[in-house]
Image (tube, rainbow, N blue to C red):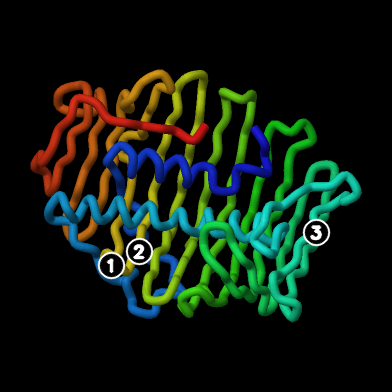
Amino acid sequence: MDMAGVKYFSMAVATVLITGCGGGGGGGGSASSPTQLSLDTQGFGDKKASLRVQSDFEDATAAYSDINDVVSLVEDVETSLLAPSGGTAVATAAAAEPEYSCANADGVVNVQQSVGATSESYVFTFSKCQVQTFSHGLLQLNGEYRSDLTASSGGSSATVVDRINISGQKLDTGEALAILGSQTSTISVTNESDFTVTTKSPSMEYRLGSDYVATRDSEFKVSQSGDVITLSMTADLVSSALAGYVSYSTPIPLEVMLTEDCPIRGHILLEGDGTVEARYGQSTGRGFGLEVLVNGSEVSYQNTCGAALPL
């Protein structure tokens, strides 16, 4: 496994499992003093979102997938800076290091890179830098994105710390853009099919115009042992689309066989002003399939489910 490529690995796996299998869960919001959110100007983090009918559950899982916009946007910006006109980035043998540039002459992107025997550090600093991204339109960015990796001498473990504080505008629509947050991932690798990734974040906030989504006090843990993937998590999802927050947790960690379509066991819980639960496989009342409960009453059951994992 590429240590430098796991920044958002556990969050991405959690998103696919939750939205793809139809479940999601809480507990991040149970802390007596939740992390303060800087971009939550309307106080969504202070209000429990509605969880009373199955459509509320579907809205919550859809909002959860929106947090992936942070992942895709950061990756899109980095790739697009290598091809500022919106064309295709082409590596040349003469270029020892990537050359990044803004699409506008008066924009500035400063990239500092430091690579040691067991460490890597990348800092992107923007000032009125226009970026013609591949999937997010024309952006103008200010601020900083930093990633620091420290690995063991044998390469079997590593820690990746990401910090992002970006503001700007989506020039195609005129909407204001902001991303603010940090996360720390710890990785332990025995081999390609035996590893653990744990990602903790006090907050990761994303605002585009009037749309706002954030994770708060989150911890995602993904491990693989042979053909079995295990996921556990706690997080608050704060969303303008939900007009509040939903807490996610896994009272029973989710276990997925790579050769199966549905988790063999697992219990995911969502908590807002009510509760939604998704129970899988051996954790259901039937011992297989997927059951969804709203406020303790079953509202749906299916004897199979899809679980496409990005591995």
Amino acid carrying label 2: it is: Val
| Mark toward the start of the polypeptide (1 vs 3) | 3
Pointer 2 with pointer 1, Cβ within 8 A: yes
Amino acid carrying label 1: it is: Gly
The residue nearer to you, when weighing 221 against 71, is 71
Above/below status of 69 relative to 91: below
Horizontal side of residue 247 vs 135, given as left or right: left
Say which residue label 2 marks. 238
Query: How far apart in space, not on screen, are marks 2 and 1 (Cα)?
Result: 6 Å
Asked if one can make out residue 169 in the rendered structure from this viewpoint, the answer is yes
Crowding at dot 2, Cα within 10 Å, few <14 / some 14-19 / many 20+, comes out as: many
The residue nearer to you, when weighing 150 against 60, is 60
| Mark toward the start of the polypeptide (2 vs 1) | 2
Query: How far apart in space, not on screen, are marks 2 and 3 (Cα)?
Result: 37 Å
Asked if one can make out residue 78 in the rendered structure from this viewpoint, the answer is no
Horizontal side of residue 26 vs 207, given as left or right: left
Residue at image position (74%, 75%) is: 108
Image quarter of residue 230: top left
Pointer 2 with pointer 3, Cβ within 8 A: no
Q: Where is residue 194 shown, x and y percent of the image? A: 57, 24
Say which residue label 1 marks. 244
Say which residue label 3 marks. 99
The residue nearer to you, when weighing 299 against 185, is 299
Residue at image position (19%, 62%) is: 50
| Mark toward the start of the polypeptide (2 vs 3) | 3
Residue at image position (79%, 35%) is: 153
Amino acid carrying label 3: it is: Glu
Horizontal side of residue 67 vs 288, given as left or right: right
Q: Where is residue 2 shown, x and y percent of the image? A: 67, 36
